[in-house]
Image: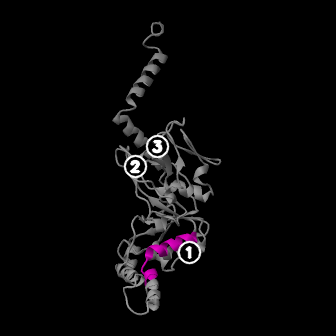
Amino acid sequence: MFLKKLSWKSDKLQAALIALAFLIASGSVFFQGLERKAYDLGVRYSHHRPNENVAIIAIDDESIANIGRWPWSRDVHAKMLDLLGAAKPKVIASTVLFLEPQTDPGLAYINKISRMVNEGSLAGSAMPLKSLIAEAQDKLNPDSHLAASMRTANNVILAMPFMLGEPLGNVEQPLPRYVTRNALAFSPSDGRDVQPPSAISVAAPIEVIGTTMSAVGHLNVLPDMDGAIRTEPLMVQYRDALYPSLSLQIVMRYLDFGVQQLQVHSNGLQLGRLHIATDNALRMHTYFYQPENGRPPFSVDSFYDVLSGKINPLKYQGKIVLIGAS
């Protein structure tokens, strides 16, 4: 009856048909491509003032040329944290992964001698030798040096990568406490209409370093079909918990919030009075700042320039410092 009352030339009918056609086609590859192009144009021609409290220390070509080939000894990272820690930045975040122990070749021999001394396999007085071995073990253990520097700074956030995908069975082993304390309990049946990306496994920082970090966040991204990054998953689900991204951890620490104060909703995250808009997969649209007059939008310094004293670390007092490769 309704259609009979409307002629085919009716504006309302034409509008309804056009809307229906767009609704049907909106899931097509063609329209998704148009949406991506429109978003890219919107980002390109909009302007946001970058936060002056964000500073980047770049592991760049100059740093590699002067310090040596990658990966560097963790003593290098420890020295950088000592310099920054004395300057009192609000947050230090590093994208360098510390997933395996770094063992100096000489340390294995020292440990072997230490075991022989403790077992009484060496004749004569062992006390001077024990003292020498203890000194050598300390000097040849860069992991413990980095851990000590992180403990002193007391504001270092590290990164860990998840392997995304739907788990097919039970997880092999539980994560250590220094990782799970960064998680927010989550169950799909708790009434929240959210579907965050799920993970099969995770590579966590080693224990000696992980126990001294202030927080850890994931570094996973979800590229679009054309390979571009337009969103960031602010949370990843692993087992029955949600793990924040590195950037979200930085924001929480900068604003003096803990992960348990984070509220998850289908349209975003609530952190105190701050609302972060997302879709129901907890993905936030990214914004890439454009250079101005040939200068990067944020302060970028070479790792080597800071390490060598060319740049005064006091420059970073009270700021968010990001350390990573460029």
Which type of secondary structure does the marked residue at label 3 adopt?
A: loop
User: Does the stretch in magenta take in 130?
Assistant: no
N-terminal of the two: label 1 or label 2?
A: 2
Q: Position of residue 56 (x, y in %)?
A: 50, 65
Q: Secondary structure at mark 2?
A: loop
SS under mark 1? helix
Taking the image as drawn, is residue 77 in sight?
no
Side of 251 relative to 103 (left or right): right
Mark sitting on residue 313: 1
Q: Nearer the viewer, mark 1 or mark 2?
A: 2
Comes first in the chain, label 1 or label 3: 3
Residue closer to the observer: 126 or 209:
126
On residue 72, the disc is none
Asked where in the image residue 130 lies, by quadrant, the reply is: bottom left
C-alpha separation, residue under disc 2 versus residue under disc 3: 18 Å
Q: What main secondary structure does the magenta stretch of the protein show?
A: helix
Residue 147 lies in magenta, yes or no? yes
